[in-house]
Image: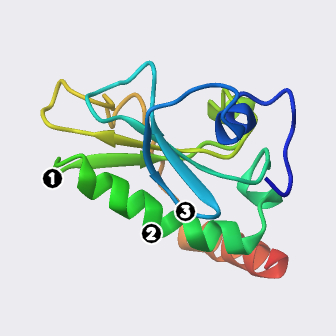
Amino acid sequence: MSHSDDKCLFCMIVKGTIPSFKVYETERSLAFLDISPVSEGHTQVIPKYHAVTIADLPDEYLADIGPVVKKVALATGASAYNVLQNNGKIAFQHVDHVHYHVIPKRSEKDGLILDVNVSWPQKKAEKEELAATLENMKARI
């Protein structure tokens, strides 16, 4: 591993010091079954580079991980699935290493349970507000 943290759970899985149920692996990415799955086939896909958030991850690792997420999603055999990636504690990130959850969704009660009224608090945005947000974001790119 080119960049790792000896105290990181996922870095230890990459190194093999903690065993895992490997689903798929490339030079830059590793996919393994989640040991506390939300549904059958729930898989973690991680870069083999220690980065806490995607902002810290080199682009070549991001480019590699996308196709791995797709392969894993298809390998679950589920026609519906969630791909979830959290950055930061308040965004529900529990392991300080970039990771993507691939969570098969075989029924309404299986997998990730979201309620659009509770878990997805939408609000009405005025066109002027959206235009200002757009300009702020473009200035940061």
At which x and y percent is residue 125? 52, 60
Q: What's under tag 2, amino acid-wise?
A: Pro
Which of the labelled discs sits on residue 26, or is there none? Answer: 3
Residue at 87% in and 38% down: 5
Q: Nearer the viewer, residue 55 or 62?
A: 62
Q: Quadrant of residue 38?
A: top left
Evaluate if marks 2 and 1 touch, with contact meaning CB atoms under 8 Å apart: no
Of mark 2 and mark 1, the one earlier in the sequence is 2
The mark lying in front, picked from 1 and 3, is 3
Mark 2 sits on what residue? 67
At which x and y percent is residue 68? 45, 62
Calculate the distance from the C-alpha at mark 2 to the C-alpha at mark 1: 17 Å
At which x and y percent is residue 100? 53, 47
Which of the labelled discs sits on residue 79, or is there none? Answer: 1
Give the crowd class for mark 2: few <14, some 14-19, many >=20 residues within 10 Å.
few
Calculate the distance from the C-alpha at mark 3 to the C-alpha at mark 2: 10 Å
Check the image and report above or below for 26 versus 19: below
Evaluate if marks 1 and 3 touch, with contact meaning CB atoms under 8 Å apart: no
Q: Quadrant of the C terminus?
A: bottom right
